[in-house]
Image (tube, rainbow, N blue to C red):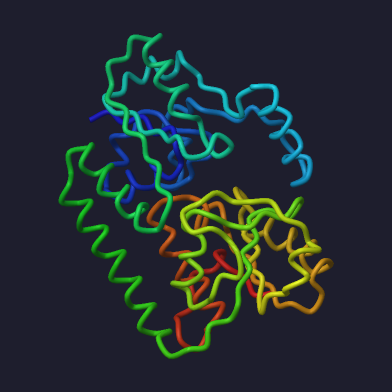
Amino acid sequence: MRIASLLPAATEIVGALGLADDLVAVTFECDEPAGIRERRPVVVDTALPAGLTPGEIDAVVRERAAAGLPQYVLDREALRAAAPDLVLTQDLCRVCALPEATVSEALGELAIDARVLTVDPHTLDDVLHAVTQVAAAAGTPEAGQALVDDLRRRLATVQTALADRPRPRVLAVEWVDPPFLPGHWVPAMVRCAGGEPLAGIDGGRSVATTWEEIADDPPDLVLVAPCGFGLDDAVAQAEVVRERLPGVPLVAVDSASYVVRAGPRLVDGIEAIAHALNPDAVPAPPPGRVRIL
């Protein structure tokens, strides 16, 4: 089957199912399986300028949204040349990826007769269900169930290791300028990792707040997980948090790979955060995932 993945999380799922060779198109953000965007045509790129600060990114995204301008650019001719049988997309967040309506419109205009699977998880369980959805659409339901069973086993192992541990009040910050509180599956990730999420909406959207409101009820620990950024950028942006919440312990995480991307590596992220909260109870993750500051 020829699979076009217009969503980094879906690309990750396809790779984890052992179907990377079936991918015929990906996005500029697809980095798992490793090297995939160098081996496959990139049909989705960002419409945002490079090199912006978090505050500048927020401003540009808001301006483009208010003007009805897209955040992403679809290379329609490259998609036509890829000739996919299955297109994986989303409609959860117009800031995070190309919306499903744009994809369907383009497929119609290009006369591409492909099945479109929209993957829109809101919770951690939804993410695991998305794995089975992609596997079924790709014709490998058994591989999907085996992958989900393994992910649930790993989650159960973490839960058992932390069953009798104190649960610190953890504030996960998904953006620093302005600060955003997490939604969707992130509060559940904090719970699975042994913390008690101080704020955030299970299954809902991230919401903006102010540092003054956060300081009124300071957490025991802040998880710095800026959306779309890796570990080094999270460490750098943690300095903003340190200035605003002096004395509060900080943990930076590669959010782009292990927190905001709704793929199998969310479980890697939970394991990494669990180690940061309870290093004597959970094995250390590979380098590059999380850093205690």
- Image quadrant where one finds the N terminus: top left
- Image quadrant where one finds the C terminus: bottom right
The quarter of the picture where residue 72 lies is top right
Residue 92 x, y percent position in the rendering: 47, 39
Height in image: 121 above or below 187?
above
The residue at 70%/22% (across/down) is 67
Q: Which residue is at the far right?
A: 243
The quarter of the picture where residue 22 lies is top left
Q: Is residue 131 left or right of residue 188?
A: left
In depth, the one of 146 and 203 nearer the eye is 203
The quarter of the picture where residue 169 lies is bottom right
The residue at 61%/50% (across/down) is 227
Residue 49 x, y percent position in the rendering: 72, 31
Q: Is residue 1 left or right of residue 169?
A: left
Residue 262 x, y percent position in the rendering: 44, 50
Residue 96 x, y percent position in the rendering: 55, 39
In depth, the one of 145 and 184 nearer the eye is 184
How many numbered tags mark residues here?
A: 0
The residue at 32%/75% (across/down) is 156
The residue at 46%/54% (across/down) is 203
Q: Is residue 29 left or right of residue 154?
A: right
